[in-house]
Amino acid sequence: MHIETGAARAMETRLFRSMFEERKRVFVDLLHWDVPVLAGRYEIDQFDNDSAVYIVIADAEGEHLASARLLPTTGDHILGTIFPELCEQAPPRGGAILEITRFCLARRLRARERLEVRNRLVSALVEYALRNRIQSYTGVAEWPWFQQILSFGWACRPLGLPGSTSCLVALQIDIDGRTREQLQASGIWRPVALAEFAKAA
């Protein structure tokens, strides 16, 4: 498990460069999102700035397996900047609220591996929140992925109805001392070692 803050610093290491490459393979090559690509290899957008936090799971060779980007909601972020209309009220903002974006699993993973790595990444996001006094995550998800997120068993709710011209849903996940047990009950939780979060302090 690796954590880095700021896209410029992340691009200095092979692991995080492989994360941006994987994002291009997933979000551009596979899902055909219309997002920027740097040097034909790296999916990097305007939200990959000095405030972005990256959580990455690496394999034994130091290559990207899974990752997520966390954005402070006190500044520009996807829900508040691009999709505020998905919320019935104003998008949640605050120092204890982060936005989860670019939840990315390596395309090379087989189905069983994807499930295990996904669970590890979800657990890491919860542990990061608990250790950094983050009370909520927000995000934007397509309807099928939103239904999966709900099934994890944690405190998750939509912030509005799906978009009229898309199947996107704005969501909020509340994190507290019960979240580990909630994910344990659904079979999602994977223990995260303290040393893995040394850089988050």
Image (cartoon, rainbow, N blue to C red):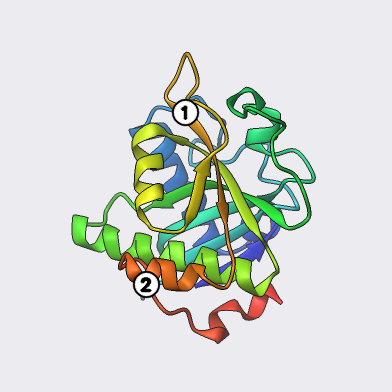
Q: Position of residue 37 (x, y in %)?
A: 54, 34
Q: Is residue 87 left or right of residue 104?
A: right
Q: Amino acid at mark 2?
A: Gln
**Mark 1 to mark 2 CA distance (whole Å):** 28 Å
Q: Is residue 166 left or right of residue 99?
A: left
Residue 14 visible, this orientation: no
163 vs 198: above or below: above
For the residue pair 23 and 52, the one nearer the viewer reads as 52
Query: Looking at the image, how many numbered discs can be counted on the residues?
Result: 2
Q: Is residue 160 left or right of residue 145?
A: right
Q: What residue is pinned by disc 2?
A: 184
Q: Amino acid at mark 1?
A: Leu
**Label 1 SS:** strand
**Label 2 SS:** helix
Residue at x-position 46% and y-position 45%: 23
Q: Which of pointers 1 and 2 lies earlier in the amino acid sequence?
A: 1
Q: Position of residue 198 (x, y in %)?
A: 63, 81
Q: What residue is pinned by disc 1?
A: 168
Contact between marks 1 and 2 (CB within 8 A): the answer is no
